[in-house]
Image (cartoon, grey):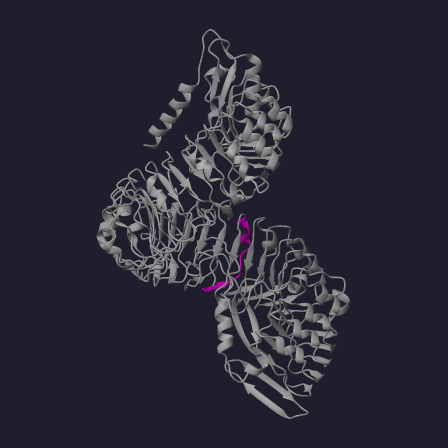
Amino acid sequence: MGSLFMVLVLMLHLSWSFSSTAHLCLPHQRAALLQFKNSISIDYYCGEDYYVEYPMTESWNKSIDCCSWDGVKCDELTGHVIGIDLSHSCLTGSLFANNSLFRLHTLQWLDLSFNYLYGSPLENTTSLLHFHGLRRLNFAHNYFGGTLSSELFSQLVSLTHLNLSANDFSGLIPHQISLLSSLVSLDLTVLNNTMLTAFDGQGFDMLARNLTKLRYLVLDSVYMSDVELTSFLNLSSSLRHLSLCYCRLHGEFPSQLFYLPNLKHIGLGGNENLTVYLPKTNWTSGLESLDISYGSGGFRGSIPPIIGNLTRLISIDLSGNWFGGQIPDVFENLNRLTSLSLSTCNLGGLLPVSMLNLTKMTTLDLSYNYFHVRMDRIQMPSSIQNVDLRSNDFYGPLPNYIFDLVSLTSLHLSLNNLSGVVESDMLSKLTNLQDIDLSGNSLVSLSTSDKDVNYSFPQLKAVFFSSCSIRQFPNFFRTSKLEFLDLSNNMISGGISKWEAEGWEELIGLNLSHNFLTSLEQFPGKRLESLDLRSNLLQGPVLSTCLNLQTLNSQLFREFLISENKLTGNIPASICSLSSLTLLDLSRNSLSGTIPECLGNMSYDLHLINLQMNNLTGKIPDSFVNNELSHLFLNNNQLEGLVPQSLANSTKLEILNLGNNKLTDRFPHWLASLPSLQVLILRHNRFRGSLSRSIASSNFSSLRMIDLSGNEFVGPLPTKLFQNLRAMRQKPKWRSSNLPFDGYDDREYTDNYYQTFVNVTTKSLEIELLKTTAIFVSLDMSNNQFSGQIPEEVGLLLSLQMLNFSHNNFTGPIPASFGNLMALESLDLSSNKLSGRIPSQMSKLTFLAVLNLSENNLVGPIPHGNQFNTFDKIPTSVTWDCVAYHCQSNATTMGRLSQLHHRWQSTRILKYPFGRWS
């Protein structure tokens, strides 16, 4: 079948080529084409991508008339090369203005889309300057960069189709683009919402007024915040397709555009400050596709009933609007509708019958709502192909009719309250199924039997059954060509045999974490990118337990997570051959020996190294280079020596945890050169000396968490340190009584996200907390030998939530400036030599839940008011020792602390998707 398809592709390209017996390709044009071919290369791995790709330039041979080459079109009379189509041709290499390809001045169309080319061919005016007859130019989906030349657009006056989408062009789009008065189609889409290119108000207004023939306009993720929305009223009445998603548009979008007579598609999604009002009456346009999702609608109340009048609608996406209530029954006349997306719309109640009776429906997305409906009372149309009902409250047994929907290609029912057993013969009916996700339904299980070997799943690529009730590895997937398999957070025990894991050679991502696995006989193969085996019972050496470096493609493998197992032995130096790793987590095992010297420079893309809680010894390698490393966890080992100064090369480092080792060093003040460092934990080592000299000129402006506790630091605290902690000096952005918003629905399934933990000690209780550093702010210098007075400048740290200066030799009064720490929730100044009164200003600390002032020489009355009045009435932890009055209080119920613990546990610090499927 694959060979037949390739033959068809070849025939398609050959039929487009032309060979004339009367007029052969001109020699100088053939030479230019061959020179172009020699200037680029072919990526022979490109065939593994999602598009059908064929390296057409392989047919280019100087002994053959170039008019017969694949992708080349010549004029039948003159022999001039007039067209080049090398789209999807696996081309890689640089392309600049001096390339020989741009000497083919007779070109009428040039298509290099969907390749791997880079350079800045449109920055220099000499590249396409003489292409006066060029009508179609398509550079889409490459890596071209640089700015767009203004003079270039003034020359390409014959262009009718221009597609520069999905590249890395940057800067302001020249006003001269409005001179392309013959343009029918323009696509300048920017990938990944990076907004590298922009329209200013005048430039877009000129475009809208002058391009009167425009029918297709796509500007997704082009920065357009400066564009006046009234400019859109000048767009051509012939416009058929308008897409302005994620453009930072703001204000009220002119509703008159919805009345354009030829408009078929309008996309305004992702403009969170844009208000869109749909026409309320007399709107019966021929609109076929409507996207006003995620922030663009500003809708409140119910879904606009006017939608029921758009009888030609094929696709509608209203996701991310705050409708609320039930879905209105307005679909009766929308009999052409094939795609309906209402994700994240705060909807609930019952599903309208007219919606489920749409006989042409192929895609239904109701994810992230609050529907509380028994699943077997929903009848899907037989035409349905893609169903996404994740994160709702659908309940009851999985209905049998789902497995009779033979057109299904994608089924997402995760994070509901479904039950039942999925058997192999049920799934085998879904011969078109490509991915299935039932994760987070704790009463759903998979059955397996000896008959499973009879079933095959030819299209199945992705299976997600995380957090279900699976006790045995399902062997009926063994013969499929799976790319992603997630069975994490189940109760699968024992080993997985080679027979059961047959077919793993094609896996891209495998997640078997949080089970009870003891061994793997079959290792994933050459396509593997992500392997997560955390929290199992695997034993033995690191690599031989789960990986075969001989069959693994080190250029693809990116995530290796195997923490919380029973691994023993050394970390082998051969692990550094995994040169494309982004995440490496070997923590919480019983690994011993030294850290390989190569670990710090094994991969430029390495974001995280987590080796904490092992038995590693020796020194930390001094081999860190300027890479992407942002999180380094080496805590809770037996490491000795100094903090390696090569860490200063890791300029993107955000979290450094070296706590609970045997490091002997002075304070590494040079870490202040790391502009992104937010968390610094050096607790319980043998650091010594004074901070005053080493830190006086340091910055540390991004630090939000500092833990120097349990060391041998001496001397006074430098006031300069607290003046430099600018991130801690910012006013808090959230109130303690509210859960902090971190961008995810709090019901979202999180097991496919890598999470990191740090330890915080409060009231002598060490708690491992999962947190977001942008939210939690703490300073712990306890259990050292600091002396002198506590600087007043500590009161500048307005975001501080936890402060621990206990078990030192501080003298003098408690600074009155502590009354400014309005976000403070835990304060421990115990076991010092503080004197004087407790500042009355501290009564303003309304969120203070943990207070320990014991073992000091404080005198005077206890402050009254606000939180101090409630210490004996609410769950909290308070201790003080007022020597002059001999008054003591010790209330240690921890309810409030538990609330804080629960809130901190609900936040996340790293959101790396596991593999590609998150």
Q: Residue at x 38, y 35 (%)?
A: 287
The magenta stretch is 564-579
For the N terminus, give its image quadrant. Answer: top left
Q: What is the count of numbered marks? A: 0
Position of 362 compared to 205: left or right?
A: left
Q: Is residue 537 visible?
A: yes
Q: Residue at x 48, y 20 (%)?
A: 72
Judge whether residue 504 is colored magenta.
no
Q: Nearer the viewer, residue 535 or 321?
A: 321
Q: Name the residue at the top extreme.
A: 22
Q: Nearer the viewer, residue 815 or 167?
A: 815
Q: Nearer the viewer, residue 368 or 401?
A: 368
Residue 354: x and y in percent read: 26, 46
Residue 749: x and y in percent read: 41, 58
187 above or below 678? above
36 above or below 252? above
Q: Name the residue at the front extreme.
A: 281
Q: Residue at x 50, y 76 (%)?
A: 896
Judge whether residue 565 is colored magenta.
yes
Q: Name the residue at the right extreme.
A: 693
